[in-house]
Amino acid sequence: MKNVKRFFQQNIWARVSFLLALPLSWLLIIYIGSLFALFITSIWKIDTFTSKVIREFTLENFFDVFTDRAYFNVTIRTLMVAISVTIICAIIAIPMAFFMARIAKPRSRPILIALVITPLWASYLVKIYAWRTMFYPESGFLNWLISPLGGSSPGFGMLAVIIGLTYLWLPYMVLPIYAGMEKLPNSMLDASSDLGAKPGRTFFRVILPITWPAIVAGSVFTFSLSMGDYITVQILGGTFQMLGNVVYQNFSLNLPFAAAVALIPVIIMMVYLAGIRRTGALENL
């Protein structure tokens, strides 16, 4: 009887494990498979006359990407934008999350969370085009606001792109930090106060180190999303370009070259995640 019961229990656990493994396998197939297809496409040739892909091995696409000064500059600009957006989002999100998690009353916290999430309900394009109307050099809202003070709108370019991306991805930084700060034990804050630490020192020496994994988690979202964005750059950037725009422009003209360029953000993100993992931040999430 015990053997029969054990047999059924083992079969049940085997079926549960199989059912749980299906979504994971599907995710791996889609993610790893798409990256593999991207890499395979990047090592193919193209017929310069017909623009048709020739399935022959070549490293010319990578040679062009990594030796051309123009693409190197685009890569650096993309990195600078992604890093700037991540830092600005962190500077804004940390005090917001701290207020929501530690200062605001418990009954008002769901309302504050809803207000943070609300911008995500609006269309991506609507929000970016709203920022475009604000950045118009002559008739935009920023020009109308600054012109009485003797200034003018910065217009379209890198600054407009950074502001637009910061607005788009800020909720993805606020929510992980809020979740991390909400789990802070009150006993640690009370102990810091009892030992004579002022609020500022408690914030920088106790709260920030404990919530560092949450900040890292938010940075993964903002950094990766900024690295791969091209629509915001196309609408707010003017002549400013990032890697996503290079991929978009070459997609229909030279698919293997576009695939080689698209691998640059993937490589950068792999290096970024490897660096974060070495710090141990991901293990404490």
Image (cartoon, helix red, strand yellow):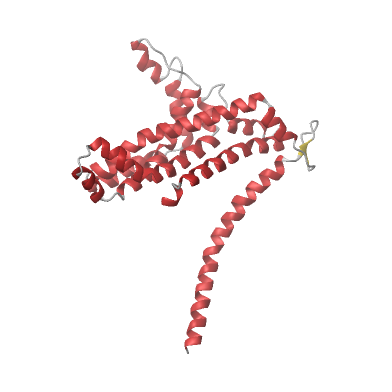
Task: Using the rendered view, name the quadrant where residue 18 is placed.
Answer: bottom right
Q: Nearer the viewer, residue 263 or 255?
A: 263
Percent x, y for residue 272? 52, 40
Residue at the bottom extreme?
Answer: 1
Give 78 or 213, whichever is nearer the viewer.
213
The residue at the point 55 percent across, 23 percent down is 240
The percent coordinates of residue 198 (x first, y second) are: 22, 37
Total number of numbered labels? 0
Q: Nearer the viewer, residue 44 or 283?
A: 283
Q: Which of the 4 image quarters holds residue 208?
A: top left
Q: Please report the residue visible at 53 percent of the width from the left and 77 percent of the height from the top.
A: 11
Percent across and percent down for residue 24 are 55, 59
Which residue shows up at 50% across the image and 29% down it?
81
Give the vertical position of 278 relative to 47 (above or below).
below
Residue 199 visible in rendering = yes
Of 141 and 164, the residue lying toward us = 164
Asked whether residue 285 is in view, the answer is no
Q: Position of residue 75 (x, y in %)?
A: 59, 30
Residue furthest out toward the front? 195
